[in-house]
Image (tube, rainbow, N blue to C red):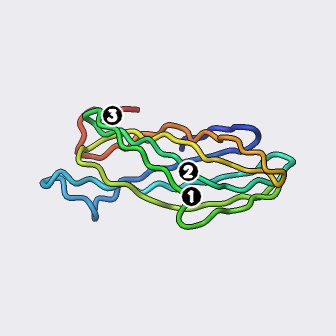
Amino acid sequence: MYAETTRSIRVSVKPFYLEDQSSPAENHYVWAYHVRIENQGQETVQLRRRHWRITDGLGRVQEVRGPGVVGEQPVLAPGATYEYTSGTPLSTPSGIMVGSYEMETPQGESFAVAIPAFSLDSPHQSIRLN
């Protein structure tokens, strides 16, 4: 489990390799990752946008930006939690993901919340990144 807190918003991520969706012989490796976002602060926030930086085992970087997560822009009141699962494929047996969420307060103030860097490791990689 990887976790980071920014401005009382705690983001935890647990990646897991999907052997049944991967095909190492074809250089196709797939991971899912479960994200838990907890509002530990005193103000309501809404997740407006996401930004991911995905780096494969050869150092190639893919940037993903877009509105919300899994088609939603959840509102988190103080004490609320939002969880979702998503995934990513790579052409190498390992990689790293890191990113941020853009949150917005009811007053219209936007701020970035860090998503901790986490390793994408498969059993087909002889050396673990983390």
Q: In this rendering, which labeled residue sits more in front, label 1 or label 3?
A: 1
Where is residue 104 shown, x and y percent of the image?
Answer: 73, 50
Label 3 SS: loop
Which label number is shown at residue 28? Answer: none
The kind of residue on which mark 2 rests is: Arg
Is the residue marked by circle 2 packed among few (<14), some (14-19), or many (20+) residues within 10 Å?
A: many
Residue ranking furthest to the left: 25
**Which callout, 1 or 3, points at the residue further toward the start of the chain?**
1
Residue under circle 1? 67
Where is residue 92 shown, x and y percent of the image?
Answer: 24, 44
Residue under circle 2? 50
Asked if the residue at tag 3 contacts the one at tag 2, i.e. Cβ–Cβ closer than 8 Å, the answer is no
Is the residue marked by circle 1 packed among few (<14), some (14-19), or many (20+) residues within 10 Å?
A: some
**Which callout, 2 or 3, points at the residue further toward the start of the chain?**
2
Asked if the residue at tag 2 contacts the one at tag 1, i.e. Cβ–Cβ closer than 8 Å, the answer is yes
The kind of residue on which mark 3 rests is: Arg
User: What residue is shown at x 51% (from left), y 55% (from top)?
Assistant: 66
Residue under circle 3? 128
> Which quarter of the rendering shows the C terminus?
top left
122 displayed left or right of 98: left
